[in-house]
Image: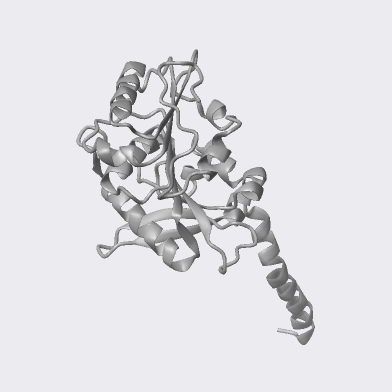
């Protein structure tokens, strides 16, 4: 091999090494940059993938709120991607959006439930092991970052909403507020739910979650003097995400809630189209 060939090849190899990270960076999506890919592993070696949004300019000397988002059925898998965009992109990107983060900078924890499994059993109201692992992942995040324990929020849509109902009852006293989109539950500890401010959204023409079932749940919650806000959309089916995240006071309501204080903006309503 001639020295002349080596002289020519070396700069090419060096250039490739320099350009490789650039090419890799070009393949990254904004989600890859903004939502850190992480994984929780339990003692049995079972793995729960999750994403973590860290507020821009994070300062460990300050305390930050955190939102735990439980995805719907289309977000299931093991790719650590679909919980962000598998039918959940409107909700997840609402909370991470610039306008929201400027007003209310917060962490967002987005675990991913495996395919063919659920966050909970709504009939028995038992959290799955994936929901239990999510709570362990949340504890790890609280140890690593400066999280305000009085401002930890829950939100979920569809299957994720089932998980929120279950979490409120299985882990009471931890949540500043909860947002639930089109989900049902067979309450086993309604008193636990009643302590947390919740905002429930339901479409009148939902063919997945029956309207009458949700209305009956709201009656039970009001009877228990729950800190309830309920919004029911006419001529709307199961996929009501766009309407929910266009609600003008959703963020102000959520950000005003803090563990241990009187709930603000609660309205116990019937089947009105808009209930505030």
Q: Position of residue 20 (x, y in %)?
A: 67, 66
Please name the residue shown 71% across and 74% down the image.
Answer: 13
* Between 108 and 223, the one nearer to me in the picture: 223
Using the image as rendered, state which of residue 220 and residue 52 is in the foreground. Answer: 220
**Does residue 267 show up?**
yes
What's the residue at 41%, 27% (across, down)? Answer: 182
**Image point 68% across, 55% down: which residue?**
26
Q: Quadrant of residue 200?
A: top left
Query: Horizontally, is 23 left or right of 123 in the view?
Result: right
In which quadrant is the N terminus drawn? bottom right
* 116 versus 224 height, above or below: below
> On the image, which quarter does residue 247 sit in?
top right
Percent across and percent down for residue 245 are 56, 32
Q: Is residue 119 visible?
A: no
Q: How is the image coloured?
A: one colour
Rendering coords of residue 88 (x, y %): 50, 37
Mark count: 0
Determine which quarter of the picture holds residue 70: top left
Residue at 34% in and 25% down: 218
> Residue 232's spot in the image, x, y percent?
46, 20
Q: Residue furthest front?
A: 262
Between 58 and 11, the residue placed more toward the observer is 58
Looking at the image, which is closer to me, 140 or 225? 225
Picture layout, residue 255 above or below residue 139? above
């Amino acid at each position: 091999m001639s020295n002349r060939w080596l002289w020519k090849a070396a700069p090419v190899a060096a250039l490739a090494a320099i350009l490789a990270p650039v090419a890799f960076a070009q393949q990254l999506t904004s989600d890859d940059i903004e939502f850190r890919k992480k994984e929780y592993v339990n003692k049995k070696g079972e793995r729960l993938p999750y994403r973590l949004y860290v507020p821009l300019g994070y300062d460990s000397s300050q305390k930050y709120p955190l939102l735990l988002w439980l995805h719907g059925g289309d977000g299931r898998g093991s790719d650590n991607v679909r919980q962000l965009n598998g039918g959940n992109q409107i909700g997840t990107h609402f909370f991470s959006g610039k306008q929201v983060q400027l007003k209310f900078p917060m962490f967002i924890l987005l675990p991913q439930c495996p395919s063919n499994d659920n966050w909970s059993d709504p009939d028995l109201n038992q959290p799955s092991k994936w929901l239990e692992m999510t709570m362990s992942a949340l504890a790890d995040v609280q140890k690593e970052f400066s999280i305000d324990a009085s401002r930890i929020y829950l939100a979920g849509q569809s299957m994720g909403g089932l998980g929120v109902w279950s979490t409120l009852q299985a882990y009471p006293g931890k949540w500043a507020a909860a947002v639930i989109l089109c989900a049902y539950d067979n309450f086993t500890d309604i008193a636990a739910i009643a302590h947390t401010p919740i905002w429930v959204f339901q479409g009148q023409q939902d063919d997945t979650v029956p309207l009458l079932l949700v209305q009956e749940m709201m009656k039970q919650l009001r009877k228990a003097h729950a800190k309830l806000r309920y919004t029911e959309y006419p001529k709307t089916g199961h996929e009501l995400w766009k309407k929910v995240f266009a609600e003008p006071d959703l963020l102000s309501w959520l950000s005003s809630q803090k563990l241990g204080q009187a709930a603000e903006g609660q309205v116990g309503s019937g089947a009105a189209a808009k209930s505030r």
